Amino acid sequence: MKILLTTEGTFPYTGGGVSTWAVSLTRGLAHHQFAVAAVVANPPDRPTMALPPNVAVLAVPLWGLEMVEEYLPLRRGLWRRRRTTTAAVATRFLPPLELLFDQVLVADADPGQVAEVLGELAAFAEQADLRRAMQDERVWRMLHARLVANPLYRHATFGEAADLARTLYRYLLPLAVPVPDVDVVHASASALCALPAIAAKVRRGIPLVLTEHGIYLRERILELVQREVSTLEKVMFSNLYRAIARAAYHVADRVAPVCHYNVRWERELGLDPSKVRVIYNGVDPGRFSPSPPPAGRPTLVWVGRIQPLKDLLTLIRAVALVAGAVPGVRCLLYGPDTDPGYAAQCRRTVTAAGLDEVVAFEGPVADASAAFARADVVVLSSMSEGFPYTVVEAMMCGRPVVATDVGGVAEALDDRSLLAEPQNAASLAAALLGQLRRSPGEREALGQRLRQRAVERFDERRFLDGYDRLYRELDGCLV
C-alpha cells in the first residue's frame, strides 16, 4: 500500500517520542510505501536519522521562505502566480477564507464546515499562489472588518489584522502540499500537519487515520500562554488549533490514540467514540533487555529532550529533597538542549540549589538502554505526555520507574505507588524515596514485573500488527 504520513516538528528532522514512533512504523512495515510530508518551522538540513528505502520525505517549512515552490514540488510556479488574479482571489479565495475566519472567531467552530472550507482553500492552493492571494489588501480589510464586527475584538487595529494575515498564511501553507496518489493518509497529530490530510479526505475521499501522541491542542495552548504575543493572537490561534483538531476528528475514518487517556480529551472535542482504536506504542524486547543492577551511589536517571514540557525544574527541586534524605544520591540527565534558554535555566537552578555534585547533565545518548543500565530508578517528570517511550523502554530494561501521572503513564505502569502529581516536587520526591528506600532485591523484583508487563502489552510486533491491520481495513482489504 501507499501511505501519506504527515508529521510536525518531528520525524525525520528532530528526535523524540513521535520520531521514535515513526521510525518504528516505517521500518517495521517495510512492505508499505510511505510518503512523508514533514511540517517544520524553517527550511531543514538533511534528516537527522537514516531513512529506509520505503520512505520518501517532503519538507514543508512554515517560515524562512517566500514562495512555496522553493520546497514544495509544485509545477509551473509562474503559471500559478499568473492565475492568482484579482478575480480569482475575490471568487475562489476570499469566500472560504472568510468562512474559516468566522469559525475561528468562536471557540466552538462547526467541524464539518471547517473541513469543507479547508478543502476549498487546498483546491485554490493547487491552482494559484497562496502567498500572493494573502497579500491582497482585500484579505486584510476583510479580516479587520470581521474582527471589529465582533464585540470581543472591536478595538482591533488594521495593523493587528495584517499581522494575523501574515501568520495565518504561514499556518495554511500545508494546504499547498501536493497529495500523491496514495491509499491511506495518516496524520500523526491533530495539528497543522493534519491540514493536507483533511483536504485529501474532503476533496478525494482518501481514507484518513489520525494518531495522537500527546494532546496537541493542550500543548499548543500551554505554549501560547507562555509566548510574548498579543491577547488577540493567543485567542485567535487557540481557536484555530481547536478548529483544526475538531475538523480532523470529524472527517477521520479512524482515530488511533496511543493511550486511552487521550480518548477522554478527544471525546470532549467531539470525537465519535466508534472511530477510536487505541494502539499503544511498542518497543523491541530484544533491543531493550535487562542488565544487572548498578553498584555504587544510588542513581536516578532521566532521559528526554530538555524543554519546558518535560519539567526538569520540578525534577531538580525534587532531587534537592531526595538528596537531603538519601546521602550520596545522584541524578543523571540524558538528552539534547532542545530549548537552550530553558536548559540554561535548569543549569542555573542546579547551581543555585547547591546540587552541582548531585545532578549531572550527560548530553544526548545514542542508546537509551545504556543510560537505563546506570539507574536504580528511572524518572519521568513531564507535565504533558502521550504514551512515552522512555517509560516503556525502561520497563523493558527491567528498571523501576517513577513518573508523573500524565497521559498514558498510569496505563503503562499499572501501579499507583510509582506515580507522582505533575508539577509537584514534594510528590515526586516522595515517590522516588519510596523506591530508593527499598532493598536492591525488592527493586529488582519490581523491575522484573514491569519488564513482563511491557513484553506482554507493549511489544513492537503488537504495535506494528495493529497499524498494518488498520491500513488494510481502511483500504478495504480486510472486513
Image (cartoon, grey):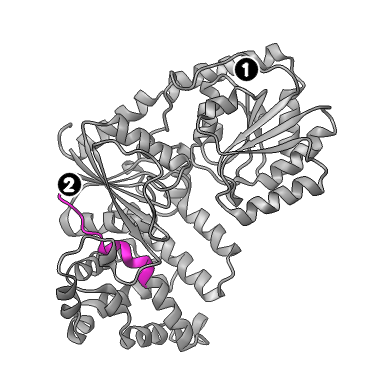
Residue type at tag 1? Leu
Label 1, secondary structure: give it.
Answer: helix
- x%, y% of residue 64? 40, 67
Residue closest to the eye, 71 or 140: 71
Q: Residue 234, relative to residue 182: is it above or below?
A: below
Tell whether 436 sits left or right of 284: right
Q: Residue at x 60, y 54 (%)?
A: 340
Instruction: Point out the image quarter for the N terminus.
Output: top left
Mark 2, residue position: 182
Mark 1, residue position: 446
Res 278 → quadrant = top left
What segment carries the magenta color?
Answer: 169-183
Between disc 1 and disc 2, whose residue precedes? 2
Q: Residue 59, relative to residue 367: is it above or below?
A: below
Tell whether 395 sits left or right of 379: left
Q: Is residue 414 visible?
A: no
